[in-house]
Amino acid sequence: MTKGLSDRVVMVTGGASGLGLAIARDLMREGATVAIVDIDGACAEREAQALRAAGGRSLGVGADVSKCGELSDAKKQIEDALGPIEGLVNNAGVAVLGAVHDTDDGLWRRVMDVNLDGVFYACRAILPSMQARGRGAIVNIASIAGLVGVPNMAAYCASKGAIIALSRQMAIDYARSGIRVNAIAPGTIGSTRMGAALLGSDLTPEAQARRLAKYPLGRYAEAGEISKAAVFLLSDDASFITGTVLTVDGGMTAY
Ligand code: 1HS
């Protein structure tokens, strides 16, 4: 794929670090204009500045995806500066540990507010522009945790399963408006803040080995292996793909 996203404005939530930043950089390489939205607005603007220095068009905006109004403000700021948003990557998310019996209300709410409501708010803010233009692509970053049970991750699994269901549902409602909606279900990425926190949380070597043994390829993902899937699904190379879940997990869910 070369410059497959030329001149397309794509918004990436949680785009200032980790997987979101890898996606933002890969999008820029494909010619996209990238709006980095992140709860850390200073970091978003710093990374956008780095993309501009590398020759891209980019804007960084601070917003907490769990706050509907902040996303509408971000959308307005982005469209005023860069033009209509034609691509959306819902990447912002939090991972927390806990089984149902030890997940308190606050923890459950936080995970649902960010991981699920955040996707809903971002889609609702951006869909009208996509509908008006009759074109758009949305990629929701779910997880293998939305497909299979992961020990001690009740709220996270529930939120990611809901993202997958919502992606399929939206694909149907918006297909006739020229808007494709897909989800990616990544396995654990070793290098990101979220991945490192998860992998560092089980300290016994046996538990570490048991988790790694679930991955037939014998290792965790690199951020770039997931970001390329996101770029593909956003691009016209995926023009007949909507309502699907692209699992990028080193074979983890093939068991
Ligand atoms: C964090 C990512 O969405 C994957 S959930 C953890 C799965 S595993 O690596 O512990 O099997």
Image: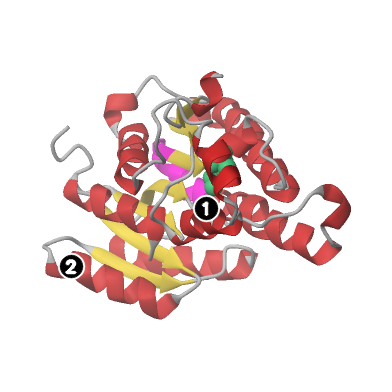
Q: Classify residue 78 as left or right of residue 145.
A: left
Q: Residue at x 66, y 57 (%)?
A: 96
Q: Which residues are magenta?
A: 126-137
Mark 1, ligand 1, within 8 Å: the answer is yes
Residue 208 % position (x, y): 54, 46
Q: Residue at x 12, y 64 (%)?
A: 54
**Element class at badge 1:** helix
- Front position in the image: 58 or 127: 58
Residue 107 % position (x, y): 76, 63
Q: Classify residue 122 as left or right of residue 32.
A: right
User: According to the image, label 1 marks what residue?
Assistant: 199
Kind of residue at disc 1: Leu
Q: Is there any visible trace of residue 142 in the rendered image?
A: no
Q: Residue at x 37, y 40 (%)?
A: 226
Kind of residue at disc 2: Arg
- Does the magenta run of residues contain 183? no
- Front position in the image: 17 or 59: 17
The numbered dot on residue 52 is 2
Q: Quadrant of the N terminus?
A: top left
Structural crowding at the residue carrying mark 1, measured as other residues with C-alpha within 10 Å and reported as few (<14), some (14–19) or many (≥20): some
**Element class at badge 2:** helix
Query: Where on the image, by quarter, is ligand 1?
Result: top right
Q: Determine whether 135 is above or below 52 in the image.
A: above
Q: Classify residue 234 as left or right of residue 98.
A: left
